[in-house]
Image (tube, helix red, strand yellow):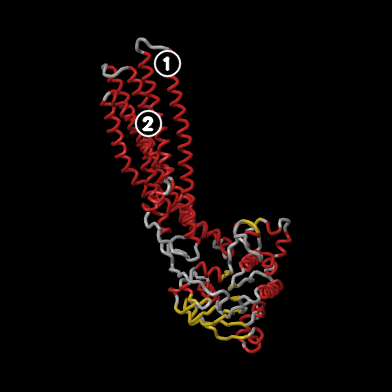
Amino acid sequence: MTTDTQRPRHGAAILRTALRRNIGAMVWGTLLMGLYQAGETAFPIALGLIVEHTMREGRSLQALALSIGALAVIITTVSLSWRFGMRILQKANTTEAHRWRVKVAACGLQPVARDVDLKSGEVLTIATEDADQTADIIEVVPLLISSLVAVLVAAVALGLADIRLGLLVIVGTVAILSVLSVMSKRIGSSTQEQQASVARAGAKVADLITGLRPLHGFGGNHAAFRSYRKVSTEAKHQSISVAKVNGAYAGTALALNAVLAGAVTLTAGRLAFDGRITIGELVMAVGLAQFIMEPLKLFSEMPKYVMIARASAERMALVLSAPPVMTPGSARPSPGGDLDVDCVRHGALTDLKFRVKAGEFVAIAPYQPRAAADLAAVLAVRVPPTAYRGTVRIGGRELADLSVEAVREHLLVNPYDGEIFAGTLRTNIDPSGTSRTVPDAVEASMLTDVVALHREGLDYGVRDRGANLSGGQRQRLSLARALAADTDVLVLHDPTTAVDAVTEQLIARNVAKLRRGRTTIVITSSPAFLDAADRVLVLDDGVITAEDTHRNLLAKDEAYCLAVAR
C-alpha cells in the first residue's frame, strides 16, 4: 500500500481542497446565480421605471410594450440562470460528496487500519452525513457571493434614488451579519458535538446488531438495550439543543431582515412624502425592500452552513489525518515462496517458530484458542510488525518490507468469522468478478447443495450478514470465497466449526486436492483437516511443542489425542 502524503490534517484543509478542485463549477455557478440575483433585483427597478414613465406626459403604447418586453426578458433570464446555475452547483456538490465518501471509506477499509479511536458506526456516519455536509461548501460560496451581488445592486439602485436609502441597506446588512456571525460559532460547536453523539449511537446500534444472537443466548439483550437507550438519549438531547440554536438563529435572522426591509420602506415613504424621491422611485424602493428579504435571508444563513461544513470537515479529518498503524514497505515476495515465522512473541505467542515450505499443506493444532487468534492476526497483518517481537518472512522477505497489496496478493488469511455481504452467492464468492476458479471453489467447499437448492443458483440473493443462510452455509460461503481467490499462500482459521462431521471430512479432502502444489495452512483442531494435512504442528503455550503426521501424533501423544479426538 502506498502511503498518502497529501492527507489533509485539518478541516480547513479539507474545505480548501474541496473549493480548489471545484473552482470551475463554482465560477460558472457564481456567474449564473449572480445573474439570477441581478435579474431578481432588476425586476422592481424596472417596475419603478415603468411607473415613472407612465406618469410622464407624452407616454406611448410602444414604450409600454417595450417595457413589458424588458420585463419578459428579465423573467426569462431569472428562470434560466437559476435552473442552470443550481444544476451546475448541485452536480459539483454531489460529486464532491462522493469523492470524500470514497476517501473516508478507503481509509476505513484499507488492509492496515488507521490509528484512530473511532468505531465502525462512527466512521460510517462520517463517510455519509459529514461528507455530504462538507461538500455543501461548494454551493454555499457561490450563493453567498450571488446574495452579496443582489444586496449591492439593491443598495446602489436605492442610493441613486437617495443616498440615505443606499446607506441604510449597507449599514443594516453589516449589522445583521455581525450579529449572526456570533451566533453561527455556537452552531458550529453544537453541531460538532451533536454529530459525535449521533455517531456514537450509530456505532452502538452496529455493535448490538452484530452481537444480537449471542446477546439473546445469555440473556444480555435487556442490558444492551438499556446501554443503547442511554447513548441514544444523549444524542436526542444534543440534537434538541442544536435545533434550539438553529431555531434561534433562523428567528433572529428573519426578524432582523424584516426590520431592515421595514426601515427601507418607511424611509422611502417619508422621502416620497417630502418630495425628495418620485412616485416611481418609491415603487422601486418598496419593491426592493420586499425583494431584498430573500437574498438577505440567504446571505444571513450562509455563515451557519459554513460552520456546519467546517465542523463536518473537522470530523472527516479525524479519519483522513490519522496515521496508519504501520508504514508498509514497497517490496514484493517471490511467487510461491516459503512462509517463515521466526521467534514471534505477541499476546499468547511466547516464542513461536516454524517454517512452511512452498506447496505444503500444513495444519496447526492450537491447544489455546487465544494463541490461534493471535497467530491469525499476525499473519493477516492486523498487527503491525513493530507491535511484536520476532520476524515473519514470506518468500524470503520480511513482512515489514512488503507492501500490503503484495502481501494480500500473495497471502490470504480467511478468518473463522468471515463477513457475508448483501448481494448474491456469486458476488460473495468472487467480488471482483475475475476469478476463474469459482466452480472449483464451490465444489471444494461443499456449497453445491446451497446453489442447487435455489432456482437462481449462484445468483441467489444473500441478505446483509447472510441473514437468510444458516451458520454452516455462511461458513462454507466464506471458505469458497477464500478458495476462489487462489492465492499462493492460504491460511484458514477454523473453516468448518459450524459444519457437520461428514461434510467436514469431504471439505478437508476437497481443499487438500484443490490446493495441491500451493501453500496451505489450516489453524484448526478438526480431525478431518489434521488428517488431510502433510504434517501437523502442535501449538501449546505459544510455542510449537510437537510436529508429525496426524496419525503418528494420535499414536504417541496422549495430550494431542485429548485435544483433537471427537
Asked whether residue 510 appears in the rendered view, the answer is yes
Residue 470 appears in which quarter of the rendering?
bottom right
Q: Which residue is mark 2?
A: 293
* Residue at the extreme bottom of the image, as rendered: 556
In front: mark 1 or mark 2? Answer: 1
Query: Where's the C terminus, which quadrant?
Result: bottom right
Residue 537 appears in which quarter of the rendering?
bottom right
Above or below, 478 relative to 248 = below
- Give the left or right position of residue 558, taking residue 286 as reference: right
Above or below, 299 relative to 434 = above
Image x and y of residue 532, in percent: 67, 79
Nearer the observer, 83 or 246:
83
Classed neighbour count for the residue bearing mark 2: other residues with Cα under 10 Å, few (<14), some (14–19), many (≥20): some
Image x and y of residue 89, in percent: 45, 41
Helix, strand or loop at label 1? It is helix
Image x and y of residue 145, in percent: 36, 38
Helix, strand or loop at label 2? It is helix
The type of residue carrying mark 1 is Leu
Image x and y of residue 197, in percent: 43, 53
- Counting the numbered discs, the total is 2
The type of residue carrying mark 2 is Met
Residue 403 tag number = none
Q: Which residue is mark 1?
A: 64
